[in-house]
Amino acid sequence: MGGTGGQIAIAGVGCAVADFVYNRVDFTSPVFQKYLSKTQGDGGLSPGKLVFVEEFESFSGKSFDQVRAEIVGTRDPDTLNLGGPAIVALISAAQLLSQQQAGVSFYGVRGNDWVGKRLGEIVAATPLDCSRYAITFSTTPYTCVFSDPAYDHGHGERTFVNNIGAAWDLHPSDLPEAFFNSPIVLFGATGLVPNLHDGLTELTGRAHDKGCFTIVSTVYDFRNEKKDPCAKWPLGKSDETYQNTDLLITDHEEALRLSNKRTIDDAMAFFRNAGLASLVVTNGSRPVQAYSEGRAFKKTGLFSLPVSQAVVDELAANPGLKGDTTGCGDNFAGGVLASIAMQMRERDAGHLDLADAIAWGIASGGFACYYMGGTYLEKTPGEKYARVKKYYDLYCAQ
């Protein structure tokens, strides 16, 4: 695994959705407050979290279209973007690696409707290999994203309402052997692809047995939260999933729910005891926390890294540059993926640098603050690499 000096292939599977992004939605307004969650897992809106359309409609007693009209009126979305923590991360990685010997492919599903066709057009404008992006006759998965750039003292936050749609049609048996022949594999936000999520133990086991560098990135697991808001979220059928995983990328709240712990220190101890090789925990505008046990990356203790001060200062000085924070976490994962691929060309697993991977993630995630939505469409190949590299260099100096 790694140290080949040649092409490094990345294969990813998981969430791909149409993001209907509504910017400048005031989370403190009376109409938005009316639909806020009252108790954990009740189906209401909650900043930073995702809720399924069916659960929200049960909570509100109204169709989601009615509520959306109350919140944003008759205006169209600011953008219809390609979103989803798996596909956006892979596109970001493909863009950052486009000038190098690397092939990045996505395995997923979309509908045969106008939304699915539009997503296909967007993917075709990126360097991502979408030949395994299958079409079904179900509705293309979509997420309505309400974004409030002023939330959290100007750091911004989003609220998501998701329709799983065609993602129900993707099963573990749909992944061919070719997927597991890639040196790096990503299972991204499978909480929004239910059958894959329930099969993660088996899937990560196959990848581990094939010697793949196996990465799992998570999303708020509203489905299991609804089942039992007091229970530990499952990741597959058992905690064996963690033993099969080389890197878990999650956020602060998801880490607490996956471990069913009250503090991040206790959560990280849980993951280490469960056999997880390395962990990265993001926390919005707060520092990233991480560790490596020495199997996937060089061994480290628990450590933390701050967000990019260059991005924070630049956006504070130039508010007009700010897009929104949608896709920052997804692009963070893409930066991490790209760094792993770049490092694996020169070094074997166990000698990779987790801090460098995080630095690329922070630079890539920070750059996502400068445009609307998660997917950045380059004007020329290599454009995104050059722009993210600028923030990577500034971050390393920081």
Image (cartoon, helix red, strand yellow):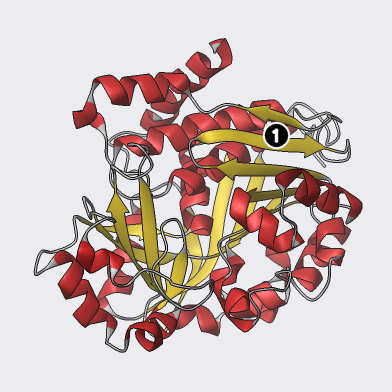
On screen, residue 299 above or below 14? above
Can you give x and y, in whole percent of width and height, for residue 231 in the image? 72, 73
Closer to the camera in the image, 390 or 97? 390
Question: Can the viewer see residue 352?
Answer: yes
- Image quadrant of residue 160? bottom left
Can you give x and y, in whole percent of width and height, for residue 302 in the image? 79, 33
Q: Quadrant of the N terminus?
A: top right
Q: Quadrant of the C terminus?
A: top right
Residue visible at 23% across and 23% down? 318
Can you give x and y, in whole percent of width and height, for residue 104 in the image? 56, 49
Reading the image, the residue beneath label 1 is 6
Is 183 on the left-hand or right-hand side of 124? right
Amino acid under disc 1:
Gly
Is 116 on the left-hand or right-hand side of 276? left
Residue visible at 42% across and 63% down? 46
Is 242 on the left-hand or right-hand side of 280? right
Numbered disc 1: secondary structure: loop
Mark 1, Cα crowd under 10 Å, few <14 / some 14-19 / many 20+, is few
Residue visible at 56% across and 42% down? 283
Q: Residue furthest toward the left?
A: 74
Question: Can the viewer see residue 244?
Answer: no
Can you give x and y, in whole percent of width and height, for residue 290 in the image? 72, 37
On screen, residue 383 above or below 32? above
Closer to the camera in the image, 191 or 70? 70
On screen, residue 278 above or below 59? above
Figure label count = 1
- Image quadrant of residue 82? bottom left
Residue visible at 59% across and 42% down? 282
